Amino acid sequence: MRVVVSGASGLIGRHLVRHLHGQGHEVVTLVRREPRGPGEVRWDPAAGQLDPAQLGAVDGAVNLSGAGVGDERWTPERKELIVSSRVDSTRTLVRALLALDAPPRVLVNASAIGAYGEGGEAVLTESSPRGDDFLADVVARWEGAAAPAAEAGVRVALARTALLADPGGGAFGRLLTLFKLGAGGRLGNGRHWWSLISTPDEVAALTFLLEQPLSGPVNLACPQPARNAEVTRELGRALHRPTLLPVPAAALHVALGEFAGQVLASQRVVPAALLGAGFRFRHPDARAVTRWLASAG
């Protein structure tokens, strides 16, 4: 299978490209700099520039581009970048794919469980309604940018990823450092539900979506979500560190600004579509995810 990947230098993209190569797939990565080899194609998503002629024959595509949601405080400018980096990259890639003589069979477009907003105690599946906060709006516009591909007959899977547990970055990369120092604990009252996925399961699920006939929203989250207090407790156990220093909600709001609302949001997400299609998770619950995280970090 010949697969185009955008966002290949990101946290998920690096692992995915390595995995696809290992599975015998040919990978073409989209880069913003001058290409360094035949496996790279230059593009400028902000300007809408990607020459279809440079892509060649394409069987599938994975779009992982987008500015980090939790990397900086949500100023108006940062919010605009969060939206535009996702919408522009998706539109640019879809336009180029549809201009090919033979469009690919499948597009796996990154998305997020932020689509559901604050869920409280409700179990959230792919059929659950959208939320009404900033991230839910981001997801609506992000997924909407992929709609022309589906309308043209391309199978489009919208990979709504949960909180990624990876020692190399993201929210869990920062948490891991605190816990190793013995400075970890629950966030707020710890009662809110956290939905997680380990990097190996994320990469396996994205590959599964390239190969299996799933379309529309697909939750990428381990089958057994857990409350924040349980996740932090399990991480402490895996690292053999205490978890006695809870972080008050007020302190999170001071440190993170508006993004603190997402850290404290309750999202009890289950991967109904993946489970129904027969996908098997290596790390199905908080204990398994945190043990892998501790061993990998």
Image: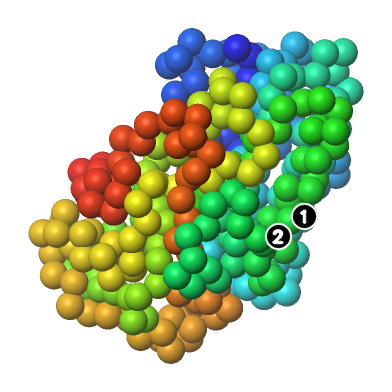
* Residue located 48% across and 60% down the image: 123
Q: Residue 144: where, in percent of width, then height?
A: 79, 48
Foreground residue among 105 and 181: 105
**Considering depth in this image, is 289 or 53 the residue closer to the camera?**
289
Please tell me the numbered disc located at residue 138: 2
Q: How many marks?
A: 2
User: Can you give x and y, in whole percent of width and height, for residue 225 in the image?
Assistant: 37, 56
**Pointers 2 and 1 in contact (C-beta within 8 Å):** yes
Per the image, the residue denoted by label 1 is 141
Coloration of the structure image: rainbow
CA gap between label 2 and label 1 equals 5 Å
Going by the image, does 130 lie left or right of 45?
A: left
- Please, what is the three-letter code of the amino acid marked with disc 2? Val
Q: Secondary structure at mark 1?
A: helix
The reply to whether residue 29 is visible in this rendering is no
Question: Label 2 neighbourhood size at 10 Å, few (<14), some (14-19), many (20+)?
Answer: many
Q: Is residue 267 visible?
A: yes
